[in-house]
Amino acid sequence: MHRSTDEPTGGTVPAGSRAHPYADGPDPGQVPDPARVDPSVLRALLRRHGWQRRGGAQGRYSRWVPPGPAAGTSLLVPDSTAFPDGEDLLAEALTALTRSATPSARDILVALTVPSDEIRWWRDVPEAASGAADWTGADQLRTAARQILLAGSLAVRGRAGHHGARHRRKARSALGGTLVGPAADGRSLTAFVPVDAGRAVAVQLYAALHAAREAVDYQRATGGMDAFDAAVAAGVSRELTEAVVSLVRGAEGARITLAWAPAAGTPEGCPASPEPVEFSPGDLLALRLAGVRYLQDEPSVPVRITGAVVRLRRSGPRGPGVVRLRVLAGAEVAHVRIELDEEAYRIAGHAHLVGLPVRVEGRLENRGGFRRLTGASQVAPVQVDEAERDRLMKSLHENVDFFEEACTGEEG
């Protein structure tokens, strides 16, 4: 099983997501509850994944066979559970699906268990000497998928050419229920985004990916970058362009396809069957230029931050220094780094000692990913209730080494 993580590893899955429950093949013990499965949804999913209808009793049930020349066991799917044997037929079909060796069976089972929009990535990569893509391709695919999902979730939080560290906690949290399939061949990967918590992300990605495709076409045809500026309103950002670059790099092409959950229907304003979005190595230059443009054009942001001092550092016992705040309010970032003059540094150090947060005004700079505050002023401790004070003091004791380094003038 893959691990849920925010950092790339050999088993990386999209940030905040969970591994596909059938990643190692269907489990006969994991049969969806027939009482909660709509036969029409099952038929729609079978059709989506290439299963073919092969007769049946008109108005009672239909027979479905899996795709491929070596088709396995067929399924009898009732038209409705209202018939006397309808529920029994549905239970038998679901049990047979869990036992099927057909690769698409696992995806159908997931979609039945949790109504989800499906996002599929496919990379056209050359065959390795062994006849299959190597493991680095699978890792690259997972990483790119993670970045694309996160870019879509960031766009839901707010439109920006460059998000940096902003909104990342909420963006990752919104992906917490996402299920991710295996990518063993380095060519294909599917993410199941639950409708209840994640449909906004899927809809946003639909708009952003098509807008990115159109902007690339415009740039390649005219040399102009204006279309990328307009695409920000659709959710395109530096994060998304870099993710697509990561997906395409080293491949002969890549394709991203979205399919809406049959149980939830088509989102308003979207087509019932969205066209796949394709990118090629010839698009990389335009995407990279857009990323640079987004980074340069996104302005710094004036903020008034309240945060707990978690690290202090300066080169000697006196003079200016650098502090790191864990942000409690005022900005959608987890931590910021601030350079302070001697007096402000002294105030921050005292607040740290007694377990009080500080309030500071300044500008979040985009070039540090919005992790650095410049032009700091109005540094002052903030009074908090006893419970919050105790929690901050506990944090101080857990990080006492950082403060001791600051007092002795050592690097932190």
Image (cartoon, grey):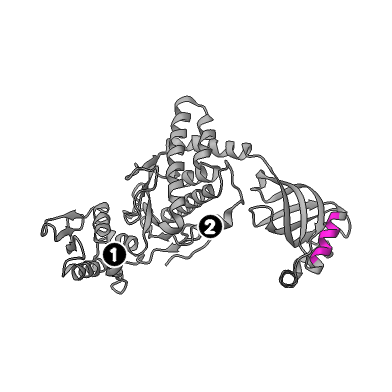
Outermost residue to the front? 82
Of discs 1 and 2, which sits in the foreground? 1
Residue in the image at 68% along x and 42% along y: 300
Query: Would you call the spot at circle 2 few (<14 residues within 10 Å), some (14-19), or many (20 or more)?
Result: many
| Residue that label 1 marks | 37
Element carrying mark 2: helix
In this picture, which residue range is highlighted in magenta?
A: 344-352
Element carrying mark 1: loop
| Residue that label 2 marks | 172
Amino acid carrying mark 1 in the image: Val
Q: Eyeballing the image, is 377 above or below 405?
A: above
Which one is in front, 337 or 79? Answer: 79
Left or right: where 207 falls relative to 22: right
Q: Quadrant of residue 71?
A: bottom left
One can see residue 14 in this view = yes
- Residue 296 rendering spot, x and y as whole percentages: 63, 37
- Residue 249 rendering spot, x and y as whole percentages: 45, 44
Residue 287 marker? none
One can see residue 26 in this view = no
Amino acid carrying mark 2 in the image: Arg
Which one is in front, 225 or 113? Answer: 113
Is 301 inside the magenta-drawn segment? no
Which one is in front, 327 or 83? Answer: 83
Which quarter of the rendered picture does the C terminus lie within? bottom right
